[in-house]
Image (cartoon, rainbow, N blue to C red):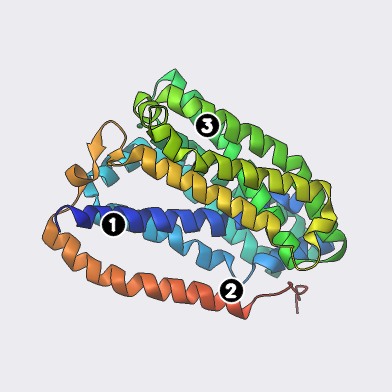
Amino acid sequence: MEYWLPIIYMGIMGLALLIYVILDGYDLGVGMLVPLANEAEKDMMIASIGPFWDANETWIVLGIGVLLIAFPVAHGIILTSLYLPVTIMLMGLILRGVAFDLRVKAGDHRRGLWNKAFFAGSLIASLAQGWMLGAYITGLHSSATSLLFSALIAMTLPALYLILGCGWLLMKTDGELRNKAINWARMAIWPMGLGLFMVSIATPLVSSTIAEKWFTLPNALYLMPIPMICLFCYGLIVAALNKPSILDKNRSYLIYASTVAICLMASLGLAYSLFPDIIIGGLTIWESAASVKSLQFTLVGVVITLPVILFYTYFVYRIFHGKATALSYE
């Protein structure tokens, strides 16, 4: 158990953060797209994420909670190093939440202000999350190379969220807004592709440990399906955007599902690159883990909590499936 418990907790934390990126990613993406729509379309965009956005943030709370409980040493080091971007992210998420609620209660003359706040909160949170991911991959170093890499991912992650947001709107809306979502995705897909390509090139350059894992035989052959699946999914998105008829006939999920697949492959690649470290080149999961008795005791709560959150997430998405309906301010 001393060997397997930290691995189990690492898997749970990774799963929680992956689900957060997939679910709250489209929330943030829709938020960043709001300024491009007219007033009626803004209401429909907000309505499309209304039943889900708050619950989606549960997953990042679970992920950070597992980090605190299961890996207290790593929690202290990571959050100390990322104190500023974490604070900025929280400010963005708070601003987004406040704007989401107050835009409904505000009069017509103030709604534009809260729409801008909703956009700003979504953008700030996305940029901060990208910066944190970049800093984490480089082992929390503060060299110029590490800072440039963090800035690169900080620019790439919002583009990924934009594609998730467009994919969500394609599934949840109709008419002119759906057509606009296709055009917005066409603008975002190339920055996302370029960013992912540059990140793929830069990652082994900033970390010799990751380079050794990926570019030595036979590892390189075993890992080849990961970039190949990403390329296939990216090509599928580009093809669907260039020929929108592909998205008809109950295939409106194609953009979102393909982007989710890219996220999944990227997460598997990141997990392989990091394991067994929780701070790359600095601390393994076993060195950082809490005592076995603490992990065993906490596991009881996790076994109860995780299925409840999964069931609630499934229940909400099942209840509110289908196309979004217009907001009412009465």
Comes first in the chain, label 1 or label 3:
1
Mark-to-mark CA distance, 2 and 1: 26 Å
| Residue ID at (23%, 49%) | 72
> Which structural element holds mark 2?
helix
Mark-to-mark CA distance, 1 and 3: 27 Å
On residue 317, the disc is: 2
| Residue ID at (63%, 59%) | 99
> Which structural element holds mark 1?
helix
Q: Does residue 289 lie above or below 137 as drawn?
A: below
Mark 2 residue type = Tyr
On residue 200, the disc is: 3
| Residue ID at (50%, 47%) | 265
> Which structural element holds mark 3?
helix
Give the x, y percent position of residue 273: 38, 37
Q: Which marked residue is nearer to the observer: mark 1 or mark 3? A: 3
Mark-to-mark CA distance, 2 and 3: 33 Å
On residue 9, the disc is: 1
